[in-house]
Image: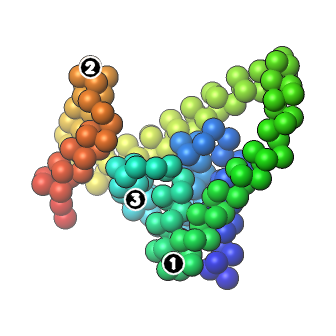
C-alpha cells in the first residue's frame, strides 16, 4: 500500500505541476504533509532547503528523499519514476501538438494565464514557510535571514547555492537544536 501512496503522492503533482519543479513544490507539500501526513510543514521546509542545496531538479530530489524515507530504495525509485513519468509521457504525446500550434493566440493566452497561478502558489508556500520560521526561530532570526539573503542575491549577486549553504551554516551555528 505504501508504494501505491508514494506513486500517487508524486504522480499527481507531476501531472498538474505545469511549470516544472518550483510549480510542483506546493503540490508535493500538499500530498506529503496534508494528505498522507508523512512530514510536518517544518520538516518539509527543512527537506526542501536541503534539496535546494544539492544540484539537479528539485522534484526528483524531493521524490527520492521522501520515497526513501517511507519505503527504502524501492520507495525512492517509485517516487522518482512517478515524478518523471507524467512529464515524459506528455512530452512525447503533446510535443507535436504544441509545436504545430505554437503561434496560436489560444496557446499564448493559456501560457500567460498559467504563470500568475504558479506565482500565487509559490507565494502561498513562501508565506507558510515564513510563518513556520517565525514561530520556531523568532522574528529576529527570520528577518535577519530574509534581509541578508535578499541583499546577497539581489544586490551583491551571490550564487543561490552559496546563500543556501550560508543559511544552513547559520542555522547549524545559531539555531541548532
Q: Residues within 10 Å of mark 2 (few under 14, many from 20)?
A: few
Q: Position of residue 95 (x, y in %)?
A: 79, 38
Name which quarter of the figure residue 29 lies in.
bottom right
Q: Is residue 165 visible?
A: yes
Instruction: Please tell me which of labels 1 and 3 falls first in the chain.
Output: 3
Left or right, 128 with respect to 74, comes to left
Tell me if residue 136 comes above or below residue 77 in the rendering: above
Of circles 1 and 3, the one toward us is: 1
Q: Position of residue 77 (x, y in %)?
A: 58, 71
Which SS class for mark 1? helix
Left or right, 51 with respect to 27, comes to left
Label placed on residue 155: 2
x 26%, y 19%: residue? 155
Who is closer to the viewer here, 65 or 9?
65
Which SS class for mark 2? helix
Q: How far separated are the C-alphas under marks 1 and 2?
A: 42 Å
Task: Report the quarter where the C terminus lies.
Answer: bottom left
Label placed on residue 168: none
Q: Which residue is mark 3?
A: 47
Q: Quick one: which residue is furthest to the left in this view?
A: 173
CB within 8 Å, label 2 to label 3: no
Instruction: Please tell me which of labels 2 and 3 falls first in the chain.
Output: 3
Q: Which residue is mark 1?
A: 73
Who is closer to the viewer here, 77 or 14?
77
Amino acid at each position: 500500500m505504501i508504494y501505491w501512496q508514494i506513486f500517487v503522492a508524486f504522480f499527481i503533482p507531476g501531472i498538474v505541476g505545469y511549470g516544472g519543479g518550483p510549480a510542483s513544490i506546493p503540490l508535493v507539500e500538499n500530498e506529503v504533509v496534508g494528505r498522507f501526513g508523512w512530514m510536518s510543514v517544518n520538516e518539509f521546509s527543512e527537506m526542501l532547503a536541503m534539496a535546494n542545496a544539492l544540484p539537479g531538479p528539485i522534484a526528483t530530489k524531493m521524490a527520492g528523499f521522501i520515497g526513501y524515507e517511507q519505503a527504502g530504495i524501492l520507495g525512492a525509485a517509485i517516487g522518482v519514476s512517478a515524478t518523471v513519468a507524467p512529464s515524459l509521457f506528455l512530452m512525447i504525446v503533446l510535443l507535436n501538438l504544441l509545436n504545430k500550434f505554437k503561434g496560436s493566440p489560444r496557446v499564448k493566452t493559456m501560457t500567460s494565464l498559467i504563470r500568475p497561478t504558479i506565482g500565487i502558489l509559490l507565494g502561498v508556500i513562501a508565506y507558510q514557510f515564513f510563518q513556520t520560521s517565525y514561530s520556531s526561530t523568532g522574528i529576529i532570526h527570520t528577518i535577519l535571514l530574509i534581509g541578508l539573503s535578499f541583499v546577497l542575491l539581489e544586490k551583491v549577486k551571490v550564487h543561490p547555492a552559496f546563500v543556501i549553504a550560508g543559511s544552513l551554516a547559520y542555522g547549524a551555528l545559531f539555531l541548532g537544536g
